[in-house]
Amino acid sequence: MRKNLFVVPILLSIVSLFIEQLSGTNTLRLLIVNGIDVLVLLLVLHETRVQYREAPYKIIYLRTHIFSLSFTALFLVLFLFSKFETLSWLLRSETAAPSLSAVILKNTFLVLKILTRFRRLNMLLESISLKPAQTIVISFLLVIIAGTLLLMMPFTAPGDTALPFLNALFTATSAVCVTGLIVVDTAAAYSFWGHLVILILIQIGGLGIMLLTYFSLFALRRGISREEKLLVAYMLSQDDMRSIRATTKSIILLTFAIEALGALLLYFSHPDFTAPYGGRIFAAVFHSISAFCNAGFALFSDSLEGFAGSIAVNGTIMLMIICGGLSFSVLMNLGALRKRRLSVNSMAVLSVSGVLILVGTLFFYGLEHGGVLRPIGTGRQYLAALFQSVTLRTAGFNTVSLASLSAPTYLLMCLFMFIGGASGSTAGGIKINTAATVAAFFRSRVKDTKQVLLFKRAIPEELVLRAFTIVAFGIVTVFCGTLILLATEEAPVMKIIFEAFSAFGTVGLSAGITSDLSVPGRVVIIIMMFMGRIGPLTMLAAAGSRRKGLEISYPSADISIG
């Protein structure tokens, strides 16, 4: 218990940031937050004192802990400076805004709260390195925390106006989980550096922090341990660890090649395809990566509605979305068709993807040709319907307004968002592979066959059970999230349901209520985005115990079903 006490200061710091988002008297909030900060300081100093007192050789302790002690000293100095700024603010006026130096000091203070725990945090990560699911969860959490702190820095916003903690956390989670839901206008609320931070978070979230880390080790010609290979194999759902190096290299290079091609096509697609900062080059690179990673972040306030009639922009974005949603294994299988045939997995992904895109296009056009599609011409109507069908692969872009769709359209889109893209891709949802397995199971029951068949191949019972586990987890997660949102938000029921499905499926499409969500509502969406990106199996594996109990067989029982 004591060895994990170092987490308490970080948790208290997060609590203080949440308190700052609550409405109420500014003075009261400041007193509570500063009280928590004092408690954090006391815990930091107490741990340092205990470690020094228990060290058998004081000089050796000072030499081996020089960096952590330096961080603690700097932490104390900045604490005193930040509290002096806060006291000055209270004495001047309760309504005046804190100075820029106070904001910078506060954020630096928060960074040091984590840096002073780095050594102990590293020990914790080493202790769970043999548990791939937990390692993946922790790595995503750390990237989200780092992204949040960066987006709270003044230089990431126009006019050096720091973003509030909850908005920064929401944006960082949405970017790392490649969702695209936003509570502030991405185009207007961030500077060039803010857009660059979001872009990096999207790329990390799309590929996975651990995959990028191990690719860096390969590039530097450093060896990796068996445990590290096991982690990468777990992420890629690959059994053969002997080809991990080649697979990782192929995935990274293929990703960068596709994103470069998309950026080149977008650069020449439309003369108005420019970003507020960085011009056409940055706009092309940003949207190419955002589309391939199925993130849905756009540098235009209306997403891509301004380019609804551009075949070049629509075609390129759809191509990137589809490539990102097919999964790396399918793309590499397609690239090696001369050497080997398509696998059952690839055939399932390609066939179901094609059916979903076609059906989605026809249904969206049929339901909305007299609605949101009515003001535009027939050709653009079909293009818009096709684009929305493709973006339901969890991409999150839109070329028509989604705030005034009909209820049947919302409901149909929820189903498509829940299914999502392919396993091992940058997309979210329960995955096409899962849906295909569940459909094959029901087909076998209708035909009364003993085996679950998919393209004349038998699916193992273990995979069928895993598929149903994923579907059940997704339904329960969306139901619980929707229930809480219905209790905390004042918005139409259908739009709340749509928001919940969009968050869990990491889609990023919104019916126009995201920016109006309350603090509890935003927290719920953040949790759902995280759970949707990590995936049901990883979440369950990370939460479960690796200890195996005794194999005990119990008597059979009869229960009435149906």
Image (cartoon, helix red, strand yellow):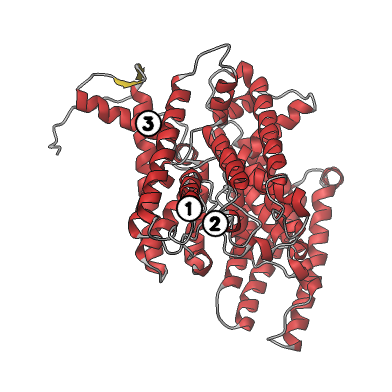
Mark linked to residue 503: 1
Q: What element carries label 2?
A: loop
Q: Is residue 3 visible?
A: no
**Which image quarter is the C terminus in?**
top left
Mark linked to residue 181: 2
**Callout 2 environment at 10 Å: few (<14), some (14 to 19), or many (20+)?**
many
| Quadrant of residue 211 within the rendered picture | top right
Q: Answer above or below: position of 394 versus 353.
A: below
Depth check, mark 3 against mark 1: the one in front is 3
Please name the amino acid that badge 2 sits on: Leu
The earlier-in-sequence mark between 1 and 2 is 2
The earlier-in-sequence mark between 2 and 3 is 2
**Residue under numbered circle 3:** 436
The answer to whether residue 354 is left or right of residue 12 is left
| Residue located 58% across and 38% down the image | 319
Badge 1 vs badge 2, beta-carbon distance below 8 Å: yes
